[in-house]
Amino acid sequence: MVTTVTAGRARLFVDTANAQEVIHWLRASDDQGRTESVAWVVMPDHIHWMFYLRETPLAIVMRTFKSRSAKALNKLNKTQGTLWQPGYYDQLQRDERQLMAEATYILTNPVRAGLAAGMNDYPFAWCRWPPP
């Protein structure tokens, strides 16, 4: 699982078009064979993304995602400059129980933040399994 934050904690993803653009690049990573997503959520100023790595190392997955999404968002918003803070936080899930707990954490993040009433009410979250 990785967490990455926007530069200056800018709330870029309250804008639906910006959130959808980031989602496009999460899915593109899967489509291009770098990752196999398990769950993700796009919060106003950060993302949580859980995935299995395929052949591509984590550092390259994250560099590619952040670079491509930043270029696309700068183009979309007619801006330029840094979109993401440097680095990211990553945590390895060691077993199925921990994997499910983290997926639930990801899906309930918008509820804890007051952005949604329930786990299925936030439009910028996805999980491969139905919620528990």
Image: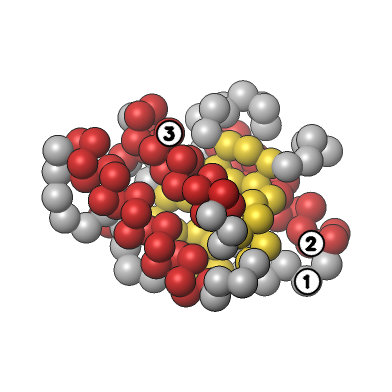
Q: Could you tell me which residue is drawn at 35 percent across and 29 percent down?
A: 17
Task: Residue 58: give x, y in percent of width and height.
Answer: 53, 72
Point out which mark residue 73 bears. none
- Residue, far front: 32
Residue 46 lies, in percent from the top left, at: 43, 50
The Cα–Cα distance between marks 1 and 3, rounded to whole angstroms, is: 30 Å
Crowd tier of the residue under label 1, counting other residues whose Cα lies within 10 Å: few below 14, some 14–19, many 20 or above: few
Q: Say what amino acid the circle numbered 2 marks.
A: Gln
Name the residue: 35% across, 50% down: 69
Q: Which of the numbered marks, if any, corresponds to residue 94? A: 1
Residue 20 numbered tag:
3
How far apart are the two marked residues, 2 and 3, measured between alpha carbons? Answer: 28 Å
Mark 2 vs mark 1, CA separation in Å: 7 Å
The residue pinned by badge 2 equals 98
Query: Does 73 sit above or below residue 49?
Result: above
Of the numbered discs 1 and 3, the one sitting upstream in the chain is: 3
